[in-house]
Image (cartoon, coloured by chain):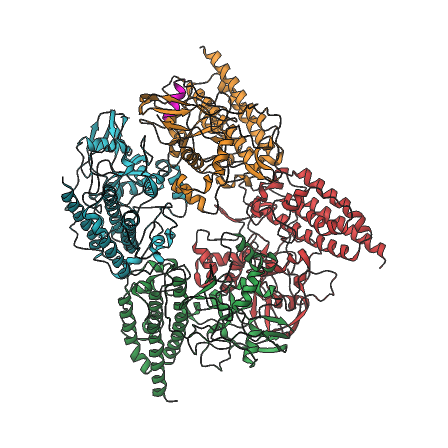
Chain colours: A cyan, B green, C red, D orange
Amino acid sequence: MTVGAEASELVQRYRGVREDSLRLCEPLAIEDYGVQPMPDASPPKWHLAHTTWFFETFVLKPYSADYRLFDPDFEYLFNSYYNGVGKQFPRSRRGNLSRPTVAQVRDYRAYVDEAMRPLLDAPAGVVEKRTILGLHHEQQHQELLLTDLKFNFGNNPLHPVYRDDRAEPERTAVREPTFSSFDGGVAEIGCGGESSFAFDNETPRHRVFLQPYMLADRLVTNGEFLAFIEDGGYTRPELWLADAWARQQSGEAWRAPLYWRLEEDGWYEYHLSGLQPLDVDAPVIHVSHYEADAFARWAGARLPTEQEWEAAVAGGGNLEQVVGEAWQWTSSPYVSYPGYRPLPGALGEYNGKFMANQMVLRGGSCVTPDGHVRPTYRNFFYPSDRWQFSGIRLARDA
Amino acid sequence: MTVGAEASELVQRYRGVREDSLRLCEPLAIEDYGVQPMPDASPPKWHLAHTTWFFETFVLKPYSADYRLFDPDFEYLFNSYYNGVGKQFPRSRRGNLSRPTVAQVRDYRAYVDEAMRPLLDAPAGVVEKRTILGLHHEQQHQELLLTDLKFNFGNNPLHPVYRDDRAEPERTAVREPTFSSFDGGVAEIGCGGESSFAFDNETPRHRVFLQPYMLADRLVTNGEFLAFIEDGGYTRPELWLADAWARQQSGEAWRAPLYWRLEEDGWYEYHLSGLQPLDVDAPVIHVSHYEADAFARWAGARLPTEQEWEAAVAGGGNLEQVVGEAWQWTSSPYVSYPGYRPLPGALGEYNGKFMANQMVLRGGSCVTPDGHVRPTYRNFFYPSDRWQFSGIRLARDA
Amino acid sequence: MTVGAEASELVQRYRGVREDSLRLCEPLAIEDYGVQPMPDASPPKWHLAHTTWFFETFVLKPYSADYRLFDPDFEYLFNSYYNGVGKQFPRSRRGNLSRPTVAQVRDYRAYVDEAMRPLLDAPAGVVEKRTILGLHHEQQHQELLLTDLKFNFGNNPLHPVYRDDRAEPERTAVREPTFSSFDGGVAEIGCGGESSFAFDNETPRHRVFLQPYMLADRLVTNGEFLAFIEDGGYTRPELWLADAWARQQSGEAWRAPLYWRLEEDGWYEYHLSGLQPLDVDAPVIHVSHYEADAFARWAGARLPTEQEWEAAVAGGGNLEQVVGEAWQWTSSPYVSYPGYRPLPGALGEYNGKFMANQMVLRGGSCVTPDGHVRPTYRNFFYPSDRWQFSGIRLARDA
Amino acid sequence: MTVGAEASELVQRYRGVREDSLRLCEPLAIEDYGVQPMPDASPPKWHLAHTTWFFETFVLKPYSADYRLFDPDFEYLFNSYYNGVGKQFPRSRRGNLSRPTVAQVRDYRAYVDEAMRPLLDAPAGVVEKRTILGLHHEQQHQELLLTDLKFNFGNNPLHPVYRDDRAEPERTAVREPTFSSFDGGVAEIGCGGESSFAFDNETPRHRVFLQPYMLADRLVTNGEFLAFIEDGGYTRPELWLADAWARQQSGEAWRAPLYWRLEEDGWYEYHLSGLQPLDVDAPVIHVSHYEADAFARWAGARLPTEQEWEAAVAGGGNLEQVVGEAWQWTSSPYVSYPGYRPLPGALGEYNGKFMANQMVLRGGSCVTPDGHVRPTYRNFFYPSDRWQFSGIRLARDA
């Protein structure tokens, strides 16, 4: 591939991803851009600004001669968690920033895009690398933007509709799941450079030893999860991890997945298309790792390890719903791969420092941008988190 | 006065107060309407809707035949604290309501104003009484709207300007305060019907016995409060009430009034007109009762009781800055007057149920609507609250 | 009175009070001395040591030449809240101090008593004054010691008995209460020196103006309070102050007085003599101010002000159960009397700094030492406190 | 082995372990038995009773005909976390149980020991198995008893001495650590039945794939950790995991290991033998996983995985201080081994339900009972826990 062609491709890709972010916001009212419904969720406006800050901070400032900051205050306001860059505006107060306005944030985006243009036309290697990282970063935030928006809308008593033209898959009554068997032995896990892009946490590629195992060929459905509820699943301590049960004994006990609502005529579930009667054949989503683990125990199964999941998918196992429906909780805590090296400098804070107390999810959800994920992709959240599009694939010992 | 003339006056007053609320919002961006920067402060949009809800709930629903609710959900969303009306949307989450939009809330206001019109043209006694109550209620929220907006803007690192055309009073260097003496003996306190309107908590008029006392003829200035700071006032336990000192020993210790900022070149204070160098001759505002009490002790004085304040003002004492600058903390806990009777029904929740743990403030501030207050007016907040326009007038035993 | 006689009386009184403290502890196991069942309650051992620390700090150190501290660490360990004396061991961790042992604390008491002897034989005026203050202080802690012990034992599932030889009053079925009427007008309140001793917060004696009022001649009974419960009193927001109702809506809702236990065969109440079937004719105790206030509203009455209570009692009103059963919540926040001056020096922290957020109780309870209280005596606790022996006397407007 | 011989050995072992628990308490004052200095630490009395409850619940009740409970309340009071057995007295309030007294708990121990005797003389298989489990359980609590006592004494300003006759190892100035290399490849991990006893979480034995690695032959010393402190280690975000750094930014920032005290003449460390000048050559103990991880990063190393640790030790690697000094934090979250099956019934709650959010420690400390640990032994605590005798062994990629 010649440099010119490559550059052109990069420009197109940059434009495409950046426009995607704005397109996702088209259905929003100005009022929707600023809401932070809980500390972990950020306002759409913040996502739009932070992804722009990423290019400004990691590409323009170091590599664009004479670049002038759009607004020096933004360096602080839209830094998420990079201590190597400087102080950060407190995460839990992002929803208080009525200023800058949406229009100003759009100006910020346009200003940075304009400044990126000459760099992308003939990108030095590091500029290209960081730009591609920035685009993957922005795709992650595209999913988060919708995830956080859903948390906002889903908790508004008016149940606003984000977009009702979404074609819901026509589901036929699902059959019983089949458990596919996979051999044990030494397997290769992680990304070794064969992919055009991977996050540092997917590297290095390395060998692991697996015992023979089985994976369900589809995800757990709402109907199956309802059976768990009706069997008293949420109130039986023997099904729960101790930390999860302590939470159930507190004032915050869960009784159903996050967006389920029990009305007089039965269960409903809030979707971005509005409040809908529960579809028992759809995969259950918005469950925590704790709920996924308890469900698996109730079902006489377990969650897969992330290595089992990856080996099965990479090996072309006969699995459905690998991506496009829900992230799939694994039983694997998020830790570094042997020989892991974070990126140098402040970018080293991207992934490595979160390797504590979180669990890996694999797959990809219905709001994950096309082409964003890979079989080696590692998503990670705390085991009590439920606002992600997170579901359950069961595993068993062979 | 004929009925027609009376009605006409009521209509005009209704229109005037309702328009005032919208006029206060003119400088706002749409983004500013939704922000709730702390649980006690409400978004401007909520103030606009709640004051409208008040007329809908207490006037239209009971007294307007065939009135149809604008939106049944609003009954829940914009009920502040009236258990007698029904459940309330949680106060701390008002900032999460991106919907209804500002435009929808304006429609709500117009709809209710339209429905109120025929009632106001020929008001029954109770309609007139409740409408007047509703207008006083809305004036209270006009002050709160600006107070809450100031908390939002004042904590935004961009220090947005609400309106920079506010004519700051030209202050000349203030002279030493004079303490005026007042006789003791039996005094009459509270409202006995001589005023055209009073809240229930100002009644009944009753006798109290006062010891002779003295009141400062002006409020404490920023310069005087700065001397307290520089004398170590915030770190000397002997000046503070025990509960206040416990707070100072926690992670939330105060070091200056709420909107003071120490920059490299000295103290600044955030105003709705922006961040300004500290005006040492202006009255100190945004101090808590705890700070006011500590300052008074440091100054060898004390705070006045609400009875002392009222008797002095009602008696035509030679006091300045009684209204128009700052609410003045008294040493009086907010309790009922002897023989107090709350309004009947849900409106009885307006004042009486808050008679615990709060302190009375007297006077009126620079953001109090004209004509809203009286010498018998009782404002009340928790002793640790600082986001109100609250200042200090000193008292002494005679 | 000659000096010798006076000294002798003081010595006897000192001995008597000091011995009373130890006698109260006779039924305790060593294990009981160290328990702090909640941050506000202190272990018996701490009470024994702190009351001794009071004499050491305020009498021996300043007035006993050559006095050597028993243990310099005790200055810090047993200082309750006197910032003027120095730092304090954190209140909430008093229960962690297994050392010093009970035997060491008894040695401390004996050591200080021995050192006090020569001072008491020929007391200078200030020594006598401070000693008498120290003895009243110790009597307060005698009541607290039993109050805190009850909280410990009452929450132990084994329901230990402190002393079962306590003669329970033989109660006959109580008659309906009578409301005695009292004239309004100017009344004198507070202590003016006619008593041999009073705390600073009872002074100065001053005039107040009272409206005519009525007081119930006896306290509210368990049976009457049970009727409130059975009428849904705890779940009806219209009966409660806003702060109290917020508490009821939290995870800590009350459903009955502190030591009531609902068993299969009815209500029981824990006493220091063990768990007993509820005596419906006994005064209700261990209710908060919030519960007392809600009960009064439910009963169509109100709580008395502290001035009403004192004027009635001082005037020889025909009231029963004034002392000896329960402290009686008033509707009066605990504030200073006009012209109040705290004691000089660190002793000034005894009372004045607590004049915020607390409510006055009048009377005296079944665990108040004989001779400790007066009609002018002001006890004070937070409105949500329930572990004191606190009950209800109703009042009405005349 | 004949039955008789076996029984006799079991009896002796039972007696030995049970007596060890009492011997550990010999230096205690009665007051020390009841203190719970933080929710995670239990009072010595509770440890003595709970270990007895274990035998009563899991051996005597099911297998001793006609056994009568010592006290039915103890079933609730001394159940730690077995939901399968019944409700549990709240963990955080164990320190409030002044009753039962120490004497009563000793009676309880004697009563249960007496009842166990006939069973041990001729143990059925399951009785023997559960008894052995109970003895290992009691040994774990022997270590916890001292660990919790140290937390109590170490936070008492009097710095009580538990036992000052402990022979401190004579340490010579330590040399630089050597990193021993270990081959990668497939290794066998866990217990496969070759040991006379193992907890369920050590099973089944299974294969893993290791990359080549290196382990330090000794533990990190106090002197080395002091260099980390003096290099600003506690205040440099790049060294810390995100969750750990968030903690450092809160009001609870750590500045040194748990029992270090900076006095005017240098660092001291509290030991059970009292406050001692810091021994720079002794292994650092009482650090959290977060501190261990930050130290390792600062040192250009990392923590070992539990598999690396076990393979090295099991393979006879040339390592010092494997047991007897400090538990060694690994980088491995505590999860189940492939094919793990918890014990059946309530005993299944022993280990498995804690497999979330905790990290594995390997080795054994100076307060671990002799003979209690094995190379396959897995200890586990939360990454922020510091009150265990936990230290650091460094690892590196080969």
Q: From which residue to which does the magenta span run?
A: D307-317
**Quadrant location of residue A230?**
top left
From the top left corner, tell me how far across and down residue A352 is, in percent: 34, 38
Q: Is residue B334 visible to the viewer in this orientation of the structure? A: no
From the top left corner, tell me how far across and down residue C170 is, in percent: 64, 53
Report the magenta stretch's main SS: helix
Q: Residue furthest bottom?
A: B2
Q: Is residue D315 visible to the viewer in this orientation of the structure? A: yes
Q: Quadrant of the C terminus of chain B?
A: bottom right
From the top left corner, tell me how far across and down residue A123 is, in percent: 21, 45
- Decide: is B268 above or below A337: below
Is residue A206 located in the magenta-colored stretch of the structure?
Answer: no
User: Which of these two is toward me, D28 or D316?
Assistant: D316
Q: Residue furthest front?
A: A65
Left or right: C367 as drawn, with respect to A358: right
User: Which of these two is toward me, A60 or B163?
Assistant: A60
From the top left corner, tell me how far across and down residue C299 is, in percent: 51, 64
Q: Residue at x 59, y 33 (%)?
A: D277
**Quadrant location of residue D297?**
top left
Q: How many marks?
A: 0
